[in-house]
Image (cartoon, rainbow, N blue to C red):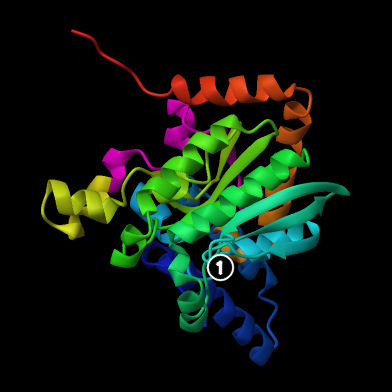
């Protein structure tokens, strides 16, 4: 059964009316096609207007939708011949981060992403998309492999944050992310990062030091979850909508602020309504960015990536 978000209920009610008219027409034999088409046109117009004016808290719901495409869905729809690489070579294979070599229109690339599940069983396998230190170390191993063999790197991010468990802290969660930030800045190949759903805190940034950072239209990218922010500022996680507004977490806001480079449009209603269309839009964005970046020398790629992050934000001196 499809999950209906709160703000989508008026659309569902209109759709029910349309279905009732269709059933009435079939049972009575009356020609009601004109009325049905009018209702369908009105429903489509209402839906377009609704999704063009979503609040940050509503985009948050779409980004977290359980039916939203996951990393491996995008891999199967965008790339060919994906071969997964396992393990950090230090004793563990963190399933929250998956990566390997694939081909994009016949060209070899390294694809790395955070994987979530669609069922409880899958989420337990992928730790609800919360990587542990071993996952970041696996990603680092693949970054270095791609750099050695001159393969572009594409990362896809959908995480509520790095795993905050005691074991993760004991095995170096903070240092693993920090090392990734440092080493990604040194890579001499094109790096493209895409926020496909949730992009939260250092857990997201550990895969996103890229030449091009892009976001799906209804994804979010933030230093802290709105619930975490609300808990700190107001001592009440229920104030998350206010926090989401203040944090500027949407692709539109982050594009204006220069944090991301491109907003990738989603199918009307969100990526979960049409996997193929969402994947197609991502592929167009990736190939467009690669065509630009492949013209740069290794040193220029490093310099551009460095300057991109150094110029973020504003500094006030007194």
Say if the magenta span includes residue 152: no
Q: Residue furthest right?
A: 106
Q: What residue lies at 71% left-to-right and 49% top-to-bottom?
A: 110
Q: Position of residue 176 (x, y in %)?
A: 44, 49
Q: Is residue 52 left or right of residue 30?
A: left
Visible in this render: residue 81? yes
Dot 1: what SS? loop
Q: Residue furthest top?
A: 318
| Range shown magenta | 244-269
Residue 89, picture quadrant:
bottom right
Q: Position of residue 120 (x, y in %)?
A: 46, 81
Viewer-closest of 230 and 58: 230
Viewer-closest of 18 and 193: 193
Viewer-closest of 207 and 175: 175
Q: What residue lies at 36% left-to-right and 62% top-to-bottom?
A: 168
Give the quarter of the figure containing the C terminus: top left
Say if the magenta span includes residue 255: yes
Q: Position of residue 197 (x, y in %)?
A: 50, 55
Q: Which residue is mark 1?
A: 93
- Above or below residue 69? Residue 105 is above
Q: Is residue 34 left or right of residue 307?
A: right
- Above or below residue 35? Residue 220 is above
- Badge 1, how many Cα within 10 Å: few under 14, some, many 20+? some
Q: Residue furthest bottom?
A: 27
Q: Residue furthest front?
A: 90
Q: Is residue 12 left or right of residue 167?
A: right
Q: Position of residue 169 (x, y in %)?
A: 32, 58
């Amino acid at each position: 059964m499809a999950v209906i978000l709160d703000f989508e209920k008026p659309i569902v009610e209109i759709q029910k009316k349309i279905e009732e008219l269709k059933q009435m027409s079939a049972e009575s034999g009356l020609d009601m096609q004109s009325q049905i088409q009018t209702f369908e046109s009105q429903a489509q117009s209402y839906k377009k207007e609704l999704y063009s004016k979503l609040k940050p808290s509503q985009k948050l719901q779409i980004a977290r939708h359980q039916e939203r495409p996951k990393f491996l869905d995008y891999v199967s729809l965008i790339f060919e011949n994906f071969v997964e690489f396992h393990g950090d070579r230090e004793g563990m294979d963190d399933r929250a981060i998956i990566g390997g070599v694939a081909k994009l229109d016949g060209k070899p690339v390294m694809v790395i992403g955070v994987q979530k599940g669609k069922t409880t069983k899958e989420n337990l396998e992928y730790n609800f998309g919360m990587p542990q230190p071993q996952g970041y170390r696996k990603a680092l191993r693949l970054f270095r492999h791609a750099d050695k063999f001159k393969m572009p790197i594409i990362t896809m991010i959908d995480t509520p944050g790095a795993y905050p468990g005691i074991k993760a802290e004991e095995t170096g969660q903070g240092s693993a992310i920090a090392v990734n930030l440092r080493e990604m800045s040194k890579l001499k190949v094109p790096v493209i990062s895409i926020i496909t759903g949730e992009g939260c805190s250092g857990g997201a940034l550990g895969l996103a030091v890229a030449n091009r950072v892009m976001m799906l239209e209804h994804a979010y990218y933030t230093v802290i979850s709105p619930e975490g922010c609300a808990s700190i500022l107001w001592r009440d996680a229920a104030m998350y909508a206010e926090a989401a507004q203040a944090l500027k977490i949407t692709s539109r806001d982050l594009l204006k602020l220069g944090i991301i480079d491109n907003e990738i449009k989603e199918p009307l209603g969100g990526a979960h309504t049409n996997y193929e269309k969402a994947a197609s839009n991502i592929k167009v964005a990736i190939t467009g960015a690669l065509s630009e970046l492949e013209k740069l020398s290794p040193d220029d790629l490093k310099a551009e990536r460095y300057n991109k992050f150094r110029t973020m934000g504003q500094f006030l001196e007194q």
